Structure formats: C-alpha cells, structure tokens
Amino acid sequence: MAYLDEHFLLHSPTARRLFHEVAKDQPIIDYHCHLSPREIATNHRWENISDIWLGGDHYKWRLMRANGIPEELITGASTPREKFQAWAETVPYTLRNPIHHWTHIELQRYFGIDLMLSPATANEIWERTNAKIAESDFCVHGLLKKFDVRVVGTTDDPADPLDDHHAIAASGLPTQVLPTFRPDKAFLVDRPDLLAPWLKKLEAASDHSIASFSDLLAALQKRHDDFHAAGGRLSDHGLDRLPALSCTDEEAALIFGRAMEGKAATPEEKEKFSFYLMVFFGQLDASKGWTKQLHLGAFRNVNSSMASRLGPDTGFDTIGDTEQGASLVKYLDALSSNGAMPKIVLYNLNPRDNYLFACLTGVFQDGTVAGKIQFGSGWWFLDQKNGMELQLDALSATGLLSRFVGMLTDSRSFLSFPRHEYFRRILCNLIGGEADRGELPDDFEALSELIRAVCFGNAKKHFGFKL
C-alpha cells in the first residue's frame, strides 16, 4: 500500500466505503480554534510557505528543537528560506510522529505536491508552494471555501473588541466566524499588576466602569450579551484544574476589592474567587443555551527561562498530572444544584483521565438535550491517531458515540483543516473495521448515519448553528 494514498488509515472494505461515500465530502464545522479574526476580516495573504507553515506553529518548533536545530532557525532572525530548510532537515526524523502525516497531507491537499519533504526536495517544494501561495485564491477566504468550512469558532477575550467579527459578518463571507467567550483573565486576583490593565480594557469594551465586584459581574454579563449578539454560542476555559473551594458573595467582593487596591490574593482566596466566577459563567451560558468548553490538565510554560524569553504558546507546555476528578465533580454538581447546567464539552490532556471524563459525562445528563454533557475530541498532545482512538473507545464504552459533536482543529494555522479528514479516516476505520469483523451490524445506512452525524450533523444541531 502506498504511503498517504486514497485509502490511508482505511484498513477494511467498509471503512473505505464509509470514508469515500459518506465522510469525505461532509462540510467542516471548526467550532473551536485559535485562528485570528483579524486575518479573516482582512482576507490575509502570506508571503511564503514559512510564513503560513512555520510561523506560530509550536508543534513543529518542539520537533525542531528535539532535532538539534538552534533557536535562531526556529523563532529567531533567520530568513524564511533558512527556517524552511531547517524544517526540511527535521521532517525525515519525524517518522511515527503525527506531524509526518500532517505535513505531507497538507502538501497534497493545499499544494498538490506528493513529494516527501527532505533536504533533497526542499528547494523544489519551496518554489512550488510559494508559486501556489502567490495565486489569487490562496488567501484566507479562498482556503475556507476550498475546504467547505461552514463555521469557525475563534477564541476571544471579553475585554477585546468584536470589531473584526462585525466586519466579517458584514463582508458576505459564506463561512460563519463566531466569537467564543474565554474570560480566564478575570481570575487574576493574585496578580493585580496584570488584572488592572485587563480591567481597563474590559471597561472600554463593555462601556461600563468597574469600581466594585458587582461592576465586574455587570461588565462580564454585558460582554456575554455582546458575544451572543455577534453569533457566539460557546464559551471556553483553559485551566490546570477546576477550582473547588466554595465562596460567598461577600468573600468574592472582598477578594476583588483587595486586588483592586493592589493586594494580591492568596492561593486559597484565588481558588474561592475563581470558583465563584466559574459558577457565574456557567449560569450565563445556561441562560442563553450556550455550550461551555473546559480544557483541563496542561502544565504551561514549565521551561521558565525559554517561556520568559519567547512568551506563551511557543512550545514549553506539557501534559499535567493534576488530579481532576474531585474538583470537576464539585463544579458540575454546583451548576446542577443551582439549576444552571449549560451544555458542556470536557477535554482532558492526560490520557489517564479518559475514562474519568467519559464516564462522568453520564452522571450529569438530564434528558433535556441529547449529549448535553460531552467528552470532547482528543486535545493537543492527544490530537493524533492513538489519542483519537483512545478517546473514541472511552466515549463509546461509557456513553453514546452517535451523539458525539466530533472534531475541531484547536489550531492557529489555516493549513490545519485536513485534520478533520484525518479524524474522519480514523473514525471510519474504527467503525468499518468493527462492522467487517461482525462487531457492529452489517447495515451500511445505519453506519452512514452515525458517520454523518459525528462529522457534521451533531455539531450543527448541538451548538445551534444556523446553516
């Protein structure tokens, strides 16, 4: 079998039928990513392949460092051509890493190039990709159209203006680009030096002065309303774990007041304050029928010297080993007890937590919405073949795979849309292989219905997108 041919990852006859006849041409809903609203609003174009392929891609940067490439050729001042050459020198060493798959799938799907990237082919691939990038339709809007992306959910701070989203909505772009409410900076009561400038931005964005804790809640609710008016239907939090210490109204107000005066909250006070806000945010989401996403378990910026030098999201985060269960149970129970349980997607980063998260979703289903509490797709370091299969197995064994909202890229790159294809091939191989072994019914239409739902239909319905 040829590498990355049409039957890549599809190891049975039914798997191949399911992918080619059902999954392959399903539209894309990329409901969670970190694409730039500004680049979408301005229909951004790229200067060269390094610009679009290597700029900001910490997945590749980590592998280049592991291959002994100096930082000058990764994030430093070297030329784009030199950085591309360094990546070409690294790719042959990435065998069995998903980056080897993604690199060459992207070369095929975006550029029509079947060559393996290496030092020997680097010059040809540099020339051919850059020629393609220079074509008029190789731009943000062109790529969204090429991959039939119906929805993009960006990740947005409530203190940021929504001007770019308004411009996109007015542009006539067929893809809906919707903001996702991520208010994690509101928890920074232990860092008054960071909280104060963020509050100034929030005041400007909400047109609401913030002199007290009640003012903060009002400003956050105003921005939640603004996001809803702009089409937002999801929120998101990125936490090492959920806070678990209950907090009264009076305690929250006192902690915030001290932070406003420049007095840093203790770890216990921050956890209490964060728990209070997390319940508040859950209530906001539930009131509007939104879905809350919880990304849990990363250890961030653990190489402190490099992180301080290059900043966040540069490749110095890792899988954490924080205990998740007790705090997650307490938070979900608080929402349920208050009658304020929104739709939720749980994402774990440590694979040891797969069955913990998958099984826990069943405890808080309430019969009001099919799949109301979801075990989310393999995230970050689990966003690869083995991680996806483990997630699908845990979900299937403890819940309803047929109600799963499916794949997302969680990416900053406009070259990442083929990850939906990658997931769909893995899904079809799993379902098709089990059908051909007699572990699932020999009913192609029933299997096709499942595939269509997980690839597109469930996300459309679950998140309430009007397509």
Image: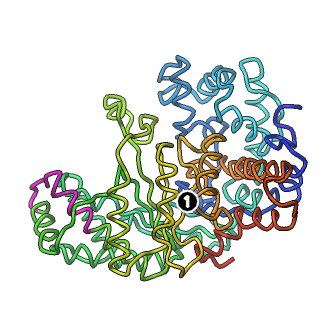
Residue occupying image coordinates x 62% and y 75%: 465
Residue occupying image coordinates x 41% and y 44%: 298
Would residue 41 be seen by someone viewing this image from the given angle?
Answer: no
Q: Where in the figure is residue 158, as x and y percent of width and height?
A: 38, 67
- Name the residue that disc number 1 marks: 32
What secondary structure is found at the residue carrying circle 1?
loop
Q: Which residues are magenta?
A: 261-276
Q: Is residue 176 left or right of residue 242?
A: right
**In the rendered image, which quarter is residue 328 located in?**
bottom left
Q: Where in the figure is residue 234, as x and y percent of width and height?
A: 50, 69
Q: Which residue is more in the foreground, 404 or 5?
A: 404
Image quadrant in which the N terminus is located: top right
Q: Which residue is more in the foreground, 292 or 10?
A: 10
In the displayed structure, would residue 404 be above or below residue 143?
A: below
How many numbered badges does the structure rendering display? 1
**In the rendered image, which quarter is residue 405 located in?**
bottom right
The colour scheme of the drawn protein is rainbow
Q: Is residue 449 left or right of residue 365?
A: right
Q: Is residue 113 left or right of residue 247?
A: right
> What kind of residue is marked 1?
His
Q: Where in the figure is residue 121, as x and y percent of width and height?
A: 77, 22
Would residue 174 be seen by someone viewing this image from the given angle?
Answer: yes
In the displayed structure, would residue 223 be above or below residue 10?
A: below
